[in-house]
Amino acid sequence: MVKIRLKRLGYKKNPSYRIIVIDSRSKREGAPIEELGYYNPKTKEMKLNVEKAKSRLSQGAQATETVMYLINNANADGSLNYKKSEKTKLSKKAQAKLEAQKAQEAQAESTEAAGQEAAAEEVSA
């Protein structure tokens, strides 16, 4: 059975991958039948021959989950259609700090509003 999968390159803690077509029984770094492109997960850089990949899939090749994601999200020129989420995740400490700041602002607003009401009552009296 032929598979489309990633072949790991790069040094320790800095992976880079080649997208290859290979016999499923051979090892990860084995000799590929065909190279379709490359992918760097750290920089989100990718170059993929989408036409060849889709033709291999139509011939019966099985793609891994990650490679299928890359094929589906590839632009026409073979680059990755990556959209960074606009909302950033905060750490638990930062979330707690933000909530405390909001509570403090709300308390300040309520005391300010109470002070304005008291001043309005004094003026009307």
Image (spheres, rainbow, N blue to C red):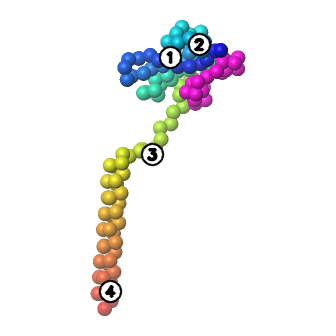
Helix, strand or loop under label 4: helix
Mark 4 or mark 2: whose residue is earlier in sequence: 2
Q: Residue at x 42, y 21 (%)?
A: 15
Helix, strand or loop under label 1: strand
Q: Residue at x 46, y 26 (%)?
A: 41
In the rendered view, tell whether residue 41 sits above or below residue 97. Answer: above
Amino acid at pointer 2 = Arg
Residue under pointer 3: 87
Amino acid at pointer 4 = Glu
Q: Nearer the viewer, mark 1 or mark 4?
A: 1
| Residue 11: quadrant of the picture | top left
Label 3 – label 2 distance at C-alpha: 42 Å
Residue under pointer 4: 121
Label 1 – label 3 distance at C-alpha: 32 Å
Helix, strand or loop under label 2: loop
Q: Nearer the viewer, mark 3 or mark 2?
A: 2
Instruction: Report the quarter where the C terminus lies.
Output: bottom left
Mark 3 or mark 2: whose residue is earlier in sequence: 2
In the rendered view, tell whether residue 97 sits above or below residue 109. Answer: above
- Residue 10, how many percent across, how many down? 41, 17
Amino acid at pointer 3 = Lys
Q: Are marks 1 and 3 in contact (CB under 8 Å)?
A: no
Residue under pointer 1: 7
- Residue 102, how many percent across, how many down? 35, 60
Q: Nearer the viewer, mark 4 or mark 2?
A: 2
Amino acid at pointer 1 = Lys
Q: Which residues are magenta?
A: 54-77
